[in-house]
Image (spheres, rainbow, N blue to C red):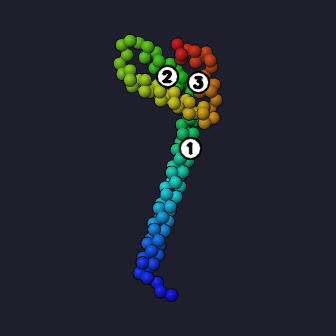
């Protein structure tokens, strides 16, 4: 059996390509495992934050920010609006993740009517 240089090159190139693919797959698998670990750690941290949050106090603080934003001469309006959006996002995420009930996070419908005013 006569093996030409061309055949040897193809085999060598195929082996190198396969090795590179293996390394890339191993790298991405490692990255996914690392991201999963980070995700679990963050999820645990988020859970701790949710449990440590005083949701009644946060609602009061949200009302205070809304009151400040209603004043025509409010300084730092953009910053206050940003904080308000952060609170809204946090509340939505907690309820969507079923970590707390809507009632625990947003309060009663009376509370919501006060916030909407």
Nearer to me, 9 or 78: 9
* SS for callout 1: helix
Q: Mark 1 points at which residue?
A: 44
Mark 3 vs 1, N-terminal side = 1
* SS for callout 2: helix
Nearer to me, 102 or 15: 15
Q: Is residue 9 left or right of residue 97?
A: left
The number of numbered discs placed on residues in the rendered structure image is: 3
Q: How packed is label 3: few (under 14 Cα within 10 Å), some, or many (20 or more)?
A: many
Residue 40 drawn above or below residue 64 = below
Residue 65 appears at what percent x and percent y? 46, 20
Residue 68 appears at what percent x and percent y? 43, 16
Residue 8 appears at what percent x and percent y? 44, 79
Look at the numbered discs 3 and 1 and tell me whether their residues touch, using CB distance below 8 Å.
Answer: no
**Residue 55 position by quadrant:** top right
Mark 3 vs 2, N-terminal side = 2
Q: Name the residue under label 3.
A: 106
Q: How packed is label 2: few (under 14 Cα within 10 Å), some, or many (20 or more)?
A: some
Mark 2 vs 1, N-terminal side = 1
* SS for callout 3: helix
Q: Name the residue under label 2.
A: 61
Q: Which mark is residue 14?
A: none
Q: Which residue is drawn at 56% across and 30% down?
A: 92
């Amino acid at each position: 059996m006569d093996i030409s240089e061309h055949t040897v090159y193809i085999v060598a190139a195929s082996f190198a390509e396969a090795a590179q693919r293996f390394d890339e797959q191993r790298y991405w698998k490692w990255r996914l495992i690392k991201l999963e670990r980070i995700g679990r750690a963050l999820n645990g941290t988020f859970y701790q934050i949710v449990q440590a949050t005083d949701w009644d106090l946060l609602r009061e603080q949200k009302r205070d920010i809304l009151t400040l934003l209603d004043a025509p001469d409010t300084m730092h309006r953009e910053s206050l609006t940003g904080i308000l959006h952060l609170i809204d996002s946090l509340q939505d995420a907690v309820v969507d993740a079923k970590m707390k009930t809507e009632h625990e996070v947003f309060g009663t419908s009376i509370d919501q009517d006060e916030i909407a005013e």
